[in-house]
Image: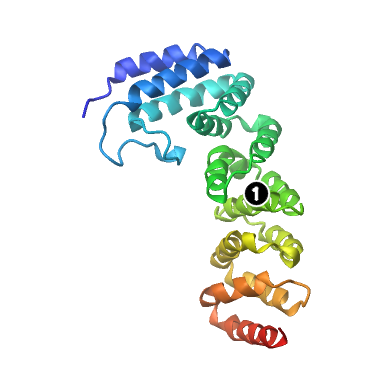
């Protein structure tokens, strides 16, 4: 396996960073750098930087690590230029540029949170699949989740309140991202968003909703079991909560399982 010359790599990245305020030139030089190192052979599993969470960036891990370190400092020194550069990379046809744009967006200082949230909202309107949304939020929203999670929760609530499935997918995936963080404690806001959405939720959302409610069970068994039982007791809660409850029944604590099973049997007889 040809070794990456670290000294040369750092020189190339330094040259790239000189173009930081020239989005077109930066994009062209970045593409050249990635193309150059992509053709280098490397052992399977050793080449993708974990934080990028994408199969597209097939370049040695060392290259991505050095690039991310250099960008981290420069983004904090020039956040407004970084935002402009993020826009340019996101508008590129190359999906690799989209990945780097979202990673850069996730490093923008929290003082620019509103501008970052605006881009998160705009960029996720492109019809991303749930799996792509997972990667997007992980890359772009990490700092906001750490510093201002309620801002993300408000975005999720707004999206879930929309009638179309694409917006609701965004909201559910964003809530999944929040609930995955043990430091996120505003679970009542998640229950409230679900309570409003479940009665008319489309069946296409069932896998995402099941994942979210399953996560809630792992975070708070008693509270989530109570929520599921309440929804089942309400005749206006819709059919999807019954399907989800059946699927998650093994995860529900024994203290609540029998009452939920009885509610499921009753609803089945009524239908």
Estimate the x, y position of residue 134 in percent, counting from the top left. 54, 47
Residues 106 and 247: in front is: 247
Residue at the farthest right position: 236
Question: Is residue 61 toward the left or the right of residue 218 in the image?
Answer: left
Q: Residue at x 49, y 16 (%)?
A: 28
Q: Nearer the viewer, residue 76 or 129?
A: 129
Which of 216 and 123 lies nearest the eye of the viewer?
123
Q: In this view, does 208 lie to the left or right of 164?
A: left
The image position of residue 153, as x and y in percent, is 69, 49
Location of residue 202 in the rendering, given as x and y in whole percent from the top left corner = 69, 62
Relative to 124, 49 lies left or right: left
Q: In x, y percent, where is residue 22? A: 57, 12
Name the quadrant of the C terminus: bottom right
The residue at 40%/29% (across/down) is 64
Alpha-carbon neighbours of circle 1 within 10 Å: few (<14), some, or many (≥20)?
A: many
Q: In this view, does 135 lie above or below 190?
A: above
Residue 229, image quadrant: bottom right
Q: In which quarter of the image is the N terminus?
A: top left
Q: Answer with the quarter of the image where residue 82 lies.
A: top right
Q: Which residue in the protein does label 1 denote?
A: 170
Coloring applied to the structure: rainbow
How many numbered circles does the render carry? 1
Query: Relative to 109, is 184 above or below?
Result: below
Label 1 residue SS: helix
Q: Which of 91 and 256 is in front in this view?
A: 91
Residue 268 occupies quadrant: bottom right
Residue found 66% across the figure and 69% down from its top: 240
């Amino acid at each position: 396996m040809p070794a990456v010359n670290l000294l040369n790599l750092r020189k190339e990245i330094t040259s790239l960073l000189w173009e930081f305020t020239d989005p077109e030139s930066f994009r062209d030089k970045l593409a050249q750098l990635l193309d150059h190192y992509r053709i280098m052979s490397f052992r399977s599993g050793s080449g993708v930087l974990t934080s990028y969470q994408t199969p597209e960036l097939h370049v040695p891990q060392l290259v991505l690590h050095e690039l991310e370190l250099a960008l981290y400092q420069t983004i904090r020194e020039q956040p407004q230029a970084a935002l402009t550069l993020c826009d340019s990379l996101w508008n590129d046809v190359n999906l690799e540029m989209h990945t780097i744009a979202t990673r850069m967006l996730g490093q923008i200082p929290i003082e620019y949170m509103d501008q970052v949230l605006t881009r998160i909202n705009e960029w996720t309107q492109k019809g991303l699949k749930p799996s792509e949304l997972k990667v997007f939020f992980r890359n772009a929203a990490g700092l906001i989740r750490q510093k201002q999670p309620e801002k993300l929760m408000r975005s999720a609530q707004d999206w879930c309140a929309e009638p179309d499935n694409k917006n609701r997918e965004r909201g559910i995936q964003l809530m999944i991202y929040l609930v995955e963080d043990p430091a996120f404690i505003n679970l009542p806001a998640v229950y409230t968003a679900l309570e409003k959405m479940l009665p008319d939720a489309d069946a296409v959302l069932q896998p995402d909703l099941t994942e979210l409610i399953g996560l809630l069970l792992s975070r708070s068994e008693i509270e989530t079991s109570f929520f599921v039982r309440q929804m089942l007791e309400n005749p206006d809660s819709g059919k999807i909560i019954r399907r989800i409850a059946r699927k998650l029944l093994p995860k529900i604590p024994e203290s609540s399982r029998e009452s939920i099973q009885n509610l499921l049997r009753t609803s089945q007889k009524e239908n």
